[in-house]
Amino acid sequence: MSNSLDSPVPPPVLAAAQARRSHSKVTEDAPSTAELERLLGAAGRVADHSALHPWRLIALRGESRARLGRALADAAGLHGSGAASLAAKPMRAPLLIAVVSSPQPSHKVAEWEQEAVASGVAHMLSLLLHEAGWGVMWRTGPHTRSKAVAAMHGLAPGEKLLGWLYVGGIPDRLGSSHDKRAPLEHRLSTLES
Ligand SMILES: Cc1cc2nc3c(=O)[nH]c(=O)nc-3n(C[C@H](O)[C@H](O)[C@H](O)COP(=O)(O)O)c2cc1C
């Protein structure tokens, strides 16, 4: 039996996933809130045990990125030029989307399952942003789960950051090709008995 994987035109989700790559350098263009909401309407449809929606996103634009930078420097206990260089990191993109795992009370769905949903939303949103023509890179760091950074985002008790999607325009001139992806077929094994 043939399926659409065999068709000369690859199915759109397959093509989008194959084409996705991260962009570490982006321009100052950024998607609007309306565009983000539209993409999130799709990204938020990932599999979600008991439909708890155990996640939320916080868009950081403008000066809020500098506040994040100061929180990172605080968390690192840095001063002077070390603090300035860490504080500048969130300015690498015009839009940062903080991915928040926001576990909901449940007797049935463990917290790790709920984090998996939040992670899935972030991956799906990255894919959709890339398909829409935006450059995206998911970034974290040693201070992602520090108190200073949680306070800067206004996280509630129990909420945890999974990092930030750094989003911006794709530069006309891309850096040298970085596609170092290894073949992944060997990651699949099959148990039949
Ligand atoms: C949860 C998570 C956190 C990440 N944090 C970083 C990071 O802090 N710095 C970094 O260089 N890459 C980080 N990455 C990896 C990049 O987002 C990216 O996937 C990697 O550079 C490979 O590029 P590619 O997505 O084009 O294959 C992270 C990825 C994930 C899923």
Image (spheres, rainbow, N blue to C red):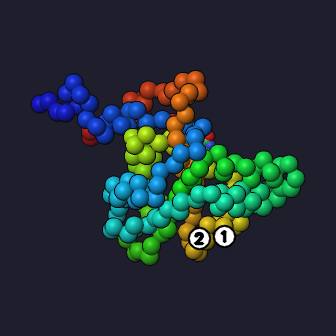
Contact? badges 1 and 2 (CB < 8 Å): yes
Q: What residue lies at 49% left-to-right and 68% top-to-bottom?
A: 102
- Residue 162 image offset from top left, x and y in percent: 55, 56
Q: Is mark 2 within 8 Å of ligand 1?
A: no
Image quarter (top left, top right, bottom left or bottom right) of the C terminus: top left
Image quarter (top left, top right, bottom left or bottom right) of the N terminus: top left
Q: Nearer the viewer, residue 55 or 126?
A: 126
Q: Quadrant of ligand 1?
A: top right
Q: Is residue 137 left or right of residue 122?
A: right
Q: Nearer the viewer, residue 117 or 138?
A: 138
Picture quadrant where residue 177 is located:
top right
- Residue 36 image offset from top left, x and y in percent: 43, 55
Q: Which residue is disc 2 drawn over?
A: 155
Give the Cα separation between the discs numbered 1 and 2: 6 Å
Q: Nearer the viewer, residue 29 or 60?
A: 29
Residue at far right of view: 80
Q: What residue type is disc 1 on?
A: Ala
Q: Is residue 117 left or right of residue 96?
A: left
Q: What residue lies at 45% left-to-right and 73% top-to-bottom?
A: 104
Secondary element type, mark 2: loop
Residue 17 visible? The answer is yes
- Residue 154 image offset from top left, x and y in percent: 61, 71
Q: Which dot marks residue 151?
A: 1
Q: What residue lies at 48% left-to-right and 69% top-to-bottom?
A: 103
Specify few, some or many for label 2: CA neighbours under 10 Å numbering under 14, 14-19, or 20 or more: some
Secondary element type, mark 1: helix
Picture quadrant where residue 51 is located:
bottom left
